[in-house]
Amino acid sequence: MKKIEKLMALSVFVAALAMVGCGDTVEGMKKDTADAVEATEEAAEKAAEKVEEAAEKTEEAAEKAVEATKEAATKAGDAVKEKAKAAGDAVKEAAKPAAEPAPAVE
């Protein structure tokens, strides 16, 4: 009978250890899950910040491109006006009546 009592005591002791171990495991899993959620939230916040920064940089680049396009269009327009004026002046010059020929010398 002593063997049975020792075996029962050992079984109770092992069961008690298992129960404590399970409780610690569950608590550990809770903590790990909470840590993982927190890390995911932090990563999402950082990603959102990066996206916002990229959007701001893109907007700034787009504004610079619009400004550069406006300047180029203005320069091109001015160049076209100058060429058109020069062409008009050339047409006017070409359309002037020819000078009268000099009198013939006899």
Image (tube, rainbow, N blue to C red):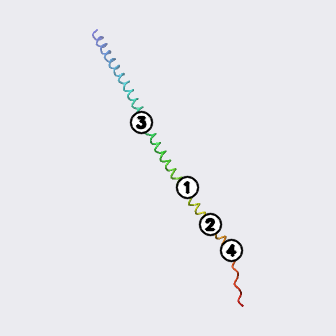
First-in-chain label (1 vs 2): 1
First-in-chain label (4 vs 3): 3
Task: Using the numbered discs, state the Cα–Cα distance from disc 1 to disc 2 in whole angstroms.
Answer: 22 Å
* Marks 2 and 3 in Cβ contact (< 8 Å): no
Task: Using the numbered discs, state the Cα–Cα distance from disc 2 to disc 3 in whole angstroms.
Answer: 65 Å
Left/right of residue 11 with respect to residue 104 in the rendered view: left
Residue ID at (37%, 25%): 27
Q: Amino acid at mark 3?
A: Glu
From the top left corner, tell me how far across and down residue 33 is, in percent.
Answer: 40, 29
Numbered mark located on residue 96 in the image: 4
Numbered mark located on residue 33 in the image: none
Task: Using the numbered discs, state the Cα–Cα distance from disc 2 to disc 4 in whole angstroms.
Answer: 17 Å
- Residue position marked by numbered label 3 in the rendering: 42
Residue ID at (43%, 34%): 41
Badge 4: few (under 14), some or many (20 or more) residues near its Cα, within 10 Å?
few
- Residue position marked by numbered label 2 in the rendering: 85
First-in-chain label (1 vs 3): 3
Q: Amino acid at mark 2?
A: Lys
